[in-house]
């Protein structure tokens, strides 16, 4: 597992039914591209977050594929329609197989 | 006809932003919707009229960069402050003590610290910066190794300490035992260095608000340090920034942590007397 990985999410705690809300996410991750070399000239193995998803009550909101050129601490800001109360589930997939998750509940009304 | 009117409007609309592009704007800095930060103040008496108004570098940045600093979630510098908090709570050195063991909650114990440093230290008999105080604790009380000046961990902890004072006005002592250091800093500020023969004042006093190639020149205030810079995507210490400036004059620079930079830090800090602490701020 990559070191110092910490997912963070900023989402509203409540919304009106059908409201479009802005969600901000950031995961601290070094996003090693696999193209750099260390002091001795050896290739530093690639280690990135390769996929990020957000689901609302099991329904997919956003699904992102990430490539090695994405910089450290990938940040995503996007909008989602909140039809009813429920949970936003965020998932990040690491190259090494680790999966990082976070959940935020949104109330309606 | 209609077309002509429209193009006149378009020409005016285009002209206004380009004309005023390099000048400071009039936006208000409020962090997280609650911390109001003073970014424009009357110059202190000791400036002798060198500046007509003292302005934070925040005003010289574009709206996007300004917005990043207005919300902790969007401010990448806060990741450093968070890492600093972890270091604060982790025991280090032979004594097995952490910063928190003596100083407790930094929200209480470190409030206002950044606003009053560099400060003359009676015991050490010299002017000390926040980083020097941190290293004094590490070597004398924790039995840990001193951090290199402006090293990653040192900057992270300094950013965390600075964040406890956000919004509080810069108020450094420049009289009494600090006076000789202040004089020395002032001399450095007005000394022309390097092949380009530029002093700090050449850019930051005489030409703030103008463009330096493609970038806006600020007054070089340091109320926002440590600063997260978009150009190198990390937190930067003020001494490293001084070094970068002097290097750009094509001079041999002083080192971070040197007596010269410590004195200069006090002097430049005093030029921003009354500005709110912003650290960790976001700049270009």
Image (cartoon, grey):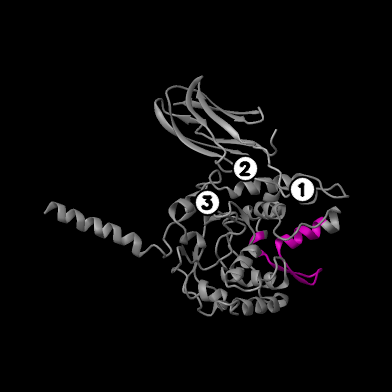
The subunit letter for the residue under badge 1 reads B
- Helix, strand or loop at label 1? It is helix
- Chain identity of mark 2: A
Q: Is residue B35 positioned above or below A17 on the image?
A: below
Residue B48, image x and y in percent? Answer: 53, 80
Q: Position of residue B62 (x, y in %)?
A: 44, 56
Q: Which residue ends up furthest to the top in the rendered image?
A: A58
Q: Quadrant of the N terminus of chain B?
A: bottom left
Q: Residues within 10 Å of mark 3 (few under 14, many from 20)?
A: many
Q: Nearer the viewer, residue B80 or B26?
A: B80
Range of the magenta residues? B114-138
Distance in Å between CA atoms under marks 1 and 3: 27 Å
Residue B215 x, y percent position in the rendering? 47, 63
Camera-near label (1 vs 3) is 3
Mark 2 in CB contact with mark 1 (< 8 angstroms): no
Q: Residue at x 19, y 53 (%)?
A: B6
Q: Which residue is mark 1?
A: B100
The residue carrying mark 2 is A35
Residue A25 makes an appearance in the image? yes
- For residue B25, which quarter of the picture? bottom left
């Amino acid at each position: 597992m990559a070191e110092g990985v910490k997912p963070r999410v900023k989402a509203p705690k409540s919304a009106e039914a059908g409201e479009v809300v802005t969600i901000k996410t950031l995961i601290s991750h070094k996003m090693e591209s696999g193209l750099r070399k260390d002091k001795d000239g050896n290739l530093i193995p690639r280690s990135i977050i390769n996929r990020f998803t957000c689901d609302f009550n099991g329904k997919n909101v956003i699904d992102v594929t990430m490539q090695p050129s994405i910089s450290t601490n990938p940040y995503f800001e996007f909008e989602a329609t909140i039809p009813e109360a429920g949970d936003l589930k965020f998932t990040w997939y690491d190259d090494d197989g680790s999966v990082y998750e976070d959940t935020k509940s949104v109330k309606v009304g | 006809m209609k077309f002509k009117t429209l193009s006149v409007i378009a020409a005016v609309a285009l002209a206004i932003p380009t004309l005023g592009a390099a000048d400071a704007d009039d936006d208000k800095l409020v962090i997280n919707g609650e911390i109001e930060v003073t970014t424009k103040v009357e110059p202190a008496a000791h400036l002798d009229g060198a500046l007509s108004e003292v302005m934070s570098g925040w005003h010289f940045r574009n709206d996007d960069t300004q917005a990043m600093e207005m919300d902790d979630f969007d401010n990448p510098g806060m990741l450093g402050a968070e890492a600093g908090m972890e270091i604060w709570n982790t025991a280090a050195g032979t004594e097995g003590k952490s910063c928190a063991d003596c100083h407790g909650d930094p929200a209480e114990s470190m409030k206002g610290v950044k606003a009053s440093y560099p400060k003359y230290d009676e015991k050490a008999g010299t002017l000390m910066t926040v980083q020097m105080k941190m290293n004094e604790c590490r070597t004398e009380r924790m039995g840990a190794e001193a951090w290199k000046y402006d090293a990653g961990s040192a900057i992270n902890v300094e950013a965390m300490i600075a964040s406890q004072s956000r919004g509080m006005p810069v108020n450094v002592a420049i009289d009494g035992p600090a006076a000789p250091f202040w004089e020395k800093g002032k001399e450095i500020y007005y000394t022309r260095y390097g092949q380009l023969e530029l002093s700090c004042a050449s850019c930051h006093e005489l030409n703030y608000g103008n463009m330096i190639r493609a970038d806006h020149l600020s007054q070089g205030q340091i109320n926002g340090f440590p600063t997260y810079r978009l150009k190198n995507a990390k937190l930067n210490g003020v001494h490293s920034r001084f070094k970068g400036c002097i290097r750009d004059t094509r001079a041999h620079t002083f080192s971070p942590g040197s007596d010269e930079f410590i004195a200069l830090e006090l002097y430049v800090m005093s030029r921003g007397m009354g500005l709110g602490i912003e650290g960790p701020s976001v700049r270009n």
